[in-house]
Image (cartoon, rainbow, N blue to C red):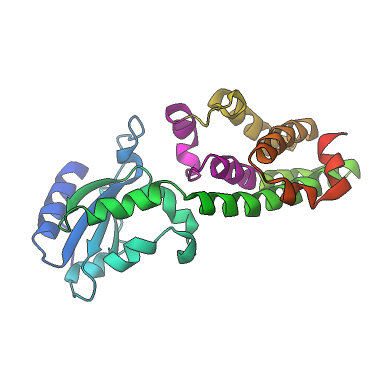
Amino acid sequence: MTVVLGDTPEDTLAAFTARAAADPAVVGLVLSGSRVHEGMPTSRSDYDLHVVLRDRQASAIAELDHFRSGHLDLVVLTLAELRTRGLPEHGEGWSRYAYVHAQVLLDRLDGTIAGILDRKRRPTVEEARAATDGFLDAYVNQTYRSLKSFRDGRDALGHLDAAESVPYALEVLFALHRRVRPYNKFLRWELERHPLGAPAWGADRLLPTVRRILADGDPATQRALFTSIEEAARAAGHDRVLDSWGADLELLRHA
């Protein structure tokens, strides 16, 4: 099966969605990516479309899973796969953000597709707590390794560990607020359009902090970030994870 490309991405999307809607095996069409983030699309942006097929019903459209062009990027999955994709039990947590701002273009199941998306948009209290605990421990571990290397005169290695701590720090911050961490491309957009609340996590403060840590691993910047995260994590009841590090936390608080 092939996708016929139109003169513009919009033409290609319109032609494909009409074709998909005519297939009785297709029960849903979900749009994600830059096109659902106001202000983010550029002249080179394609359309990220998820095509949902009825369980146990064959369709030639299944052959188009992972189809990519300058106009259209397709993910084809069954209804059962859509229900779990991106959730903790699925094992591909990285895919969850694709659904946070996704838009339903077709739902033949009387709101079922929309309901599945709503389940993905925000972690449950239990999911957020488990994610915070896991990522917080990883963040402390990576920051501790970094600051030990800086202390011992191994600045280049400390810088490398500092850079690896940043993804964990971002995961912690969003999990603390029961939010799905955005893809890096949408980090500024998310912080500006949907702030995390505290001034320390605003785009004008958090992003320069992240850039400085990525640039050279500056120990003082790492310690300032850790102090803010520790305060927020303890306020949210994650003392057990932090206290398990005992006296080692002193290195993260003081030079």
Residue 96 vs residue 139: left or right?
Answer: left
Residue 192 part of the magenta segment = yes
In the rendered image, the vertical position of residue 12 relative to residue 54, given as above or below: above
Q: Is the magenta stretch mostly helix, strand or loop?
A: helix
In the rendered image, the vertical position of residue 52 relative to residue 56, given as above or below: above
Closest to the observer: 176 or 163?
A: 176
- Residue located 19% across and 74% down the image: 57
Picture coordinates of residue 206, whole percent (x, y): 60, 30
Residue 241 part of the magenta segment = no
> For the N terminus, which image quadrant?
bottom left
Picture coordinates of residue 24, whole percent (x, y): 11, 66
Q: Residue furthest right?
A: 152
What range of the chain is rendered magenta? 166-194
Query: Do we see residue 218 in this rendering?
Result: yes
- Residue located 8% across and 60% down the image: 22
In the rendered image, the vertical position of residue 223 relative to residue 167, given as above or below: above
Closest to the observer: 216 or 168?
A: 168
> How many numbered circles does the render carry?
0
Residue 65, by quadrant, is: bottom left
Residue 26 vs residue 255: left or right?
Answer: left
